[in-house]
Amino acid sequence: MTTEGGVRVVGTDDDSVTVEDGTFAHWDGDGDAGTHTLDLPCDQGDDRTRDNCGGMPLVHVPAGVTLTVRARNAGIDVSDVRGELSLSTVNGDVTVQDSGAKEARQHLVTRNGSVRATGLAARGVGAETVNGDVDLLCTTSPDTLDGVSRNGSVRVTLPADAPPYATDTRTVNGRSTVDVPAAGATDHRYRLTLRTVNGDTEAHRG
């Protein structure tokens, strides 16, 4: 899915993709290898697409899809999508609710905005921003989790029964707090890496 604005994506039990009434959208490509691209174009000079510019149109998708969203100048909001996620925007927040899958890798990136996820299931997580916070609440214990910011805090909450992690948390101007059990020196089965320059890094069990 591509857009010059933002988008809200909700997973449903339906097998089809639907776009809210009044939103101009079209499919690109021929669907090779089961991949389909939905484009939400933006053109301020076109009455049909003007509302897509910086807006947040609603798109319903099958709950189990592998979802890729590339946005610009607005946020991405995803809920109830139970598959692999690759979400990126430039100026806006990435927000995820009750999504992901235990065996999937989740990639959540913005440049100027925050990355926030609640109810996130994953085998691996990469969450990154430059100016903003990274705040993740996981329902599973990922094998690897990388959270990176430059100007903002990075906070991760793992399940209450999360296993010991090889944890590496660093900040320049802030404090690091970790209350996740530490793995042994040679145990790298589960790895947690949190980085920022200006802000705190925190890792907790819920």
Image (spheres, helix red, strand yellow):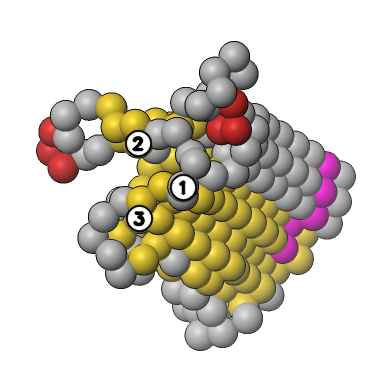
The answer to whether residue 137 is left or right of residue 41 is right
Horizontal and vertical percent for residue 84? 35, 54
Q: Which mark is nearer the camera, 2 or 1?
A: 1
Looking at the image, is 146 positioned above or below residue 100? Answer: above
Q: Where, by quadrant of the figure, is residue 90 drawn?
A: top right
Q: Residue furthest bottom?
A: 161
Magenta span? 195-202
Residue at the spot 22% in from the left edge and 26% down from the top edge: 29
The circle on residue 38 is: 2
Query: Mark 3 highlights which residue?
Result: 61
Residue at the spot 28% in from the left edge and 65% down from the top edge: 14
Looking at the image, is 184 positioned above or below residue 39? Answer: below
Label located before the other in sequence (3 or 1) = 1
Q: Which mark is nearer the camera, 3 or 1?
A: 1
* Type of amino acid at the residue the image marks with label 3: Val
Is any part of residue 150 visible from this angle?
no
Looking at the image, is 118 positioned above or below residue 112? Answer: below
Give the main secondary structure of the magenta stretch.
loop
Asked if residue 172 is among those painted magenta in the image, a careful observer would answer no
Which secondary structure, mark 3?
strand
